[in-house]
């Protein structure tokens, strides 16, 4: 009986440690703060490019990426009873991808996060752009101070233009998932 109790305690401890190393919350900034992540890819990573209506498609190669997550000092929880939607924090995501042809694709997205027990255990931050600008998921790499920007098949983000602007390019994944890992930068490098 004692061996069984020790084994159960060991399994539960290992599970608790795995959950702690899995959570994204420790990598998120405090109110008024920014956390930054970046990577250089060798070889470059493929990313699907498309027009707003997906009538023009191509594949680009990402040679570097920078991701910033910012929490406004004025951010307050939102409870939308009519819409059935609520969040405790609304982070801003800025993503810059440098392609091998030297072009820079830049976009910003909104990431809503709730301070519930389940959400505090989750490894993901789901981000979107209004006006059908698309979505992306940002996952924590387990046990690391690193994230992966992951586009599931069919998921993409608009770059460049605002809701009413034309000529936007979408980056993402058309048929197969695309994942772009980035490592956390120091505060000094984040402000540069």
Image (cartoon, rainbow, N blue to C red):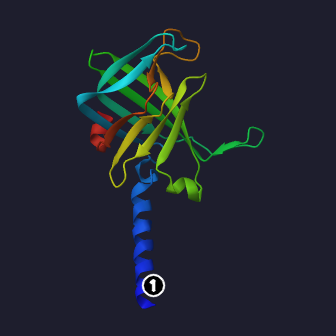
The picture places residue 129, in percent across and down from the top left corner, at 55, 27
The structure residue drawn at horizontal position 59% and vertical position 22%, both measured from the top left corner, is 132
Can residue 72 be seen at all in this image of the molecule? no
The picture places residue 29, in percent across and down from the top left corner, at 44, 46
Judging depth in this view, the residue of 32 and 4 nearest the camera is 4
Judging depth in this view, the residue of 164 and 148 nearest the camera is 148
Judging depth in this view, the residue of 16 and 67 nearest the camera is 16
The number of numbered badges drawn on the structure is 1
In the orientation shown, which residue stands out farthest toward the left? 42
Can residue 86 be seen at all in this image of the molecule? yes
The structure residue drawn at horizontal position 51% and vertical position 10%, both measured from the top left corner, is 55
Residue 119 lies left or right of residue 33; in this view the side is right
Could you say which quadrant of the image residue 183 lies in? top left
The structure residue drawn at horizontal position 48% and vertical position 46%, both measured from the top left corner, is 124
The picture places residue 89, in percent across and down from the top left corner, at 57, 45
Residue 44 lies left or right of residue 96; in this view the side is left
The C terminus sits in image quarter: top left
The picture places residue 88, in percent across and down from the top left corner, at 60, 47
- Residue position for label 1: 5
Packing grade of label 1 (10 A; few <14, some 14-19, many >=20) is few
The structure residue drawn at horizontal position 49% and vertical position 35%, both measured from the top left corner, is 92
Could you say which quadrant of the image residue 4 lies in? bottom left
| Element under disc 1 | helix
């Amino acid at each position: 009986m004692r061996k069984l109790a020790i084994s159960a305690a060991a399994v539960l401890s290992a599970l608790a440690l795995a959950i702690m190393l899995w959570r994204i919350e420790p990598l998120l900034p405090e109110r008024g703060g920014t956390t930054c992540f970046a990577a250089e890819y060798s070889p470059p990573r493929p990313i699907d490019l498309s027009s707003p209506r997906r009538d023009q498609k191509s594949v680009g190669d990402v040679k570097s990426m920078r991701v910033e997550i910012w929490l406004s000092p004025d951010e307050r929880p939102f409870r939308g009873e009519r819409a059935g939607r609520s969040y405790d924090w609304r982070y801003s995501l800025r993503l810059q991808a440098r392609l091998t042809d030297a072009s820079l694709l830049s976009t910003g997205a909104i990431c809503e996060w709730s301070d519930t027990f389940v959400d505090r255990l989750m490894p993901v931050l789901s981000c979107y752009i209004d006006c059908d600008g698309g979505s992306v998921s940002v996952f924590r790499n387990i046990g690391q101070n690193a994230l992966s920007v992951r586009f599931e098949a069919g998921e993409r983000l608009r770059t460049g233009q605002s809701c009413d602007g034309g000529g936007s390019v979408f980056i993402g994944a058309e048929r197969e998932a695309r994942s772009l890992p980035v490592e956390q930068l120091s505060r000094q490098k984040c402000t540069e």
